Image (cartoon, rainbow, N blue to C red):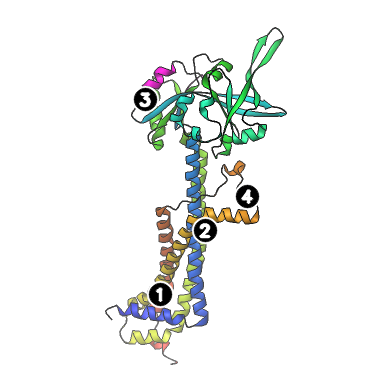
Amino acid sequence: MNSPYEWLIGTRYLSGARRQGFISFVAAMSVLGLMLGVAVLIVVLSVMNGFERELRSRILSVTAHATVTGLQGSFANWPAASAKALQDHEVLAAVPFIDAQAILAHGQHVVGAQIRGVAPELERKATGLAQKFTAGNIDQLVSGQYHIVLGSALAAALDAKVGDTLFLLAPEATATPAGLQPRMRRFAVTGIFSSGMYEYDRALALVEIHDAARIYRMGDNVSGLRLAIRDPWRAPSVVRDVALSLGGGFYVSDWTRSHESFFRSITVMKSILFVILLMIVGVAAFNIIATLVMIVKEKRSDIAILRTLGAGPVNMLTTFAIQGVLIGLTGTLLGAALGVLVAHNLENWVHGLEHVLGTHFLDASVYNMSDLPAYVEVLDVVKVCAVAFALCVLATLYPAWRASRTAPAEALRHD
């Protein structure tokens, strides 16, 4: 009884509209459309967030946070440089590596690959690739034994498995009395890893760093240092500081730069999808306008009586705005709840649907991953709900303004 009469009348009109067939249907469609629009927006943004997080996690598991390499492709006196880099409290590890290209041959299968020479005892400090092995382990890379570890997709392309032998052909040739001969070496496959990133699983092979140095004739030099940084987001600034502390003259890179196109495309796609899917919410807002216009037309006599009893235009505007706000609030809250529920269970539902249909929706060779992860960010949910509710509030202004402009004498002329 202490509530403002605008609230009492507005909620009564809205409950009365539910007893009117067509008006009730339009109001229900407004709530349903708004709910679906908000839910779809939240699910799509959550999928994009999950894709970005999963991609970032997998990238950081197979590549270093940052690298410092020589301008000529060779890095001399790397032990001293590694010790100098570790003096920076942001650097957790600084390990040497050799990066080169090669052709791998196994039977009738010939595939180009990226060869990474690593020190097994140090590699665990730089990345999590050592924990991604599906067969064998990184400790089996022993200097002088010429062992090699293949990515899962690369092993499939070569039709190779643990225990097989293959040939590595370096792009450099060796001069012999018989002419130039390709530099070739037999390797034994001792391990297979699966990072979950097709880009790496299809192209990357690991060998022991001293074996790589002998094949590519680098002596005691390496290609550079790979850095593990305490806060990966600070990698661009930290790697620059490390290079300057070493005296400069190095090429620096970091994971945000080498994979910039991935993350930029995800950000752009999120913005585009947000704008496009917001049109669904816009359609629901137009339905709110239609619902309130019909209620205003039906209640012209009541409005006239209230105006005669002393209700002002602002009171009438508030009365009908309350109805639109309630419709918008209901649809927005239901949509947020539905969107969060679907996003949290999306991956399991997709796997179930794939099992039923006997197909796979995501091709790892195209999307770099085979799962459809979703991660709900509170800020995205708040943003979607705020925009949707704001559109609903704007949609109530015109019908409420029409109700406030109703002339009592004109409305009661034929009553």
The secondary element bearing badge 4 is classed as loop
- Residue 378 rendering spot, x and y as whole percentages: 40, 54
- Residue 259 rendering spot, x and y as whole percentages: 50, 37
Would residue 337 be counted in the magenta stretch?
A: no
Q: Rounded to the nearest whole Å, what is the CA distance between mark 4 and mark 1? A: 46 Å
Q: Amino acid at mark 3?
A: Leu
Tag 4 residue: 360
Tag 2 residue: 277
Going from the N terminus, do you reach mark 3 or mark 2 first?
3
Q: Residue at x 49, y 35 (%)?
A: 131
Q: Which residue range is magenta in the image?
A: 69-85
Going from the N terminus, do you reach mark 4 or mark 2 first?
2
- Residue 47 rendering spot, x and y as whole percentages: 50, 51
Going from the N terminus, do you reach mark 3 or mark 4 first?
3
Q: Residue at x 64, y 28 (%)?
A: 112
Going from the N terminus, do you reach mark 4 or mark 1 first?
1
Q: Rounded to the nearest whole Å, what is the CA distance between mark 3 and mark 4? A: 45 Å
**Looking at the rendering, in which quadrant would you find the C terminus?**
bottom left
Would residue 295 appear left or right of 208 to someone viewing this image?
A: left
Picture disc at residue 323 = 1
The secondary element bearing badge 3 is classed as loop
Tag 3 residue: 86
Q: Are marks 1 and 3 in contact (CB under 8 Å)?
A: no
Q: Amino acid at mark 4?
A: His
Closer to the camera in the image, 64 or 275: 64
**Looking at the rendering, in which quadrant would you find the N terminus?**
bottom left
The secondary element bearing badge 1 is classed as helix
